[in-house]
Image (tube, helix red, strand yellow):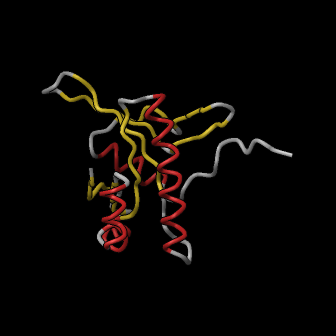
Amino acid sequence: MRYNQGMPARDIYHAVVRNALIKDGWTITQDPLPLKWGKKDMFVDLGAERLLAAEKGEQKIAVEIKSFRSISEMKDLEQAVGQFLIYRSVLAQREPNRVLYLAVPQDVVEDVFQEPLGQLLIGSAAIRVIGFEPTREEVVTWIP
C-alpha cells in the first residue's frame, strides 16, 4: 500500500537560509517550491529570484537546505546529492531557467565540499552549493 506523505518537515536551518537569501538581495517567491513529475509530488525548500539590472532580466534559483547533522557525514552527503539530482532533473524539464542550489552550513562547505570527494561532486555532478553562516544568517559562499 502506498501513501502520500504530503509536504516534508522543514530543515532546522530553513528560516536561517530564507533570511540569509533575503539579506543577499533575493526575493523568496515559493516556500516551498512544488514540483510534480508523473504521480510524484516533490517540494524544494525555497524558490527565489532577483532582478538583474544590467541584463534587464531576472535570475531564478531553487534551494534545497540540508543541515548535515546526523552521525554519518557520508549518509548526509548521499541523501543530499540524491535529492539534488532528482530535483535538478525535474526542474530541467519544468523550469529550465531556474538553477538548483544545495544550501549547507559554511562548516559543511569547508569540511565536505573542499575535500576531494566534494570537489569531485562539484565538478563531475555539477552540484551547486550555497554556504551560510547560521548564527549571522548570512550567505558566505556560492559555488557555481
Residue nearest the observer in this picture, 3 or 16: 3
Q: Position of residue 40 (x, y in %)?
A: 66, 37
Taking the spot 34% from the left edge, 42% from the top edge, the residue there is 22
Of all residues, the one furthest to the left in this rendering is 54
Q: Residue at x 12, y 27 (%)?
A: 54
Q: Is residue 2 above or below residue 106?
A: above
Residue at point 47%, 50% (across, down): 84
Judge from the rendering whether residue 125 lies leftward or rightward of residue 56; answer left or right.
right
In this view, the residue farthest toward the front is 124
Total numbered labels: 0
Residue 124 x/y as whole percent:
33, 56
Q: Nearer the viewer, residue 121 or 56?
A: 121
What residue occupies the far bottom of the structure in this picture?
71
Along the viewing direction, whichever of 124 and 30 lies nearer the viewer: 124
Q: Is residue 72 above or below residue 39?
A: below
Up/down of 54 relative to 105, above or below: above
Q: Is residue 105 left or right of residue 4?
A: left
Q: Residue furthest top?
A: 56
Q: Residue at (44%, 37%) from the top-left corner?
A: 47
92 left or right of 6? left
Residue 109: percent from left, percent from top? 33, 66
Rendering quarter of residue 57: top left
Q: Position of residue 39 (x, y in %)?
A: 69, 32
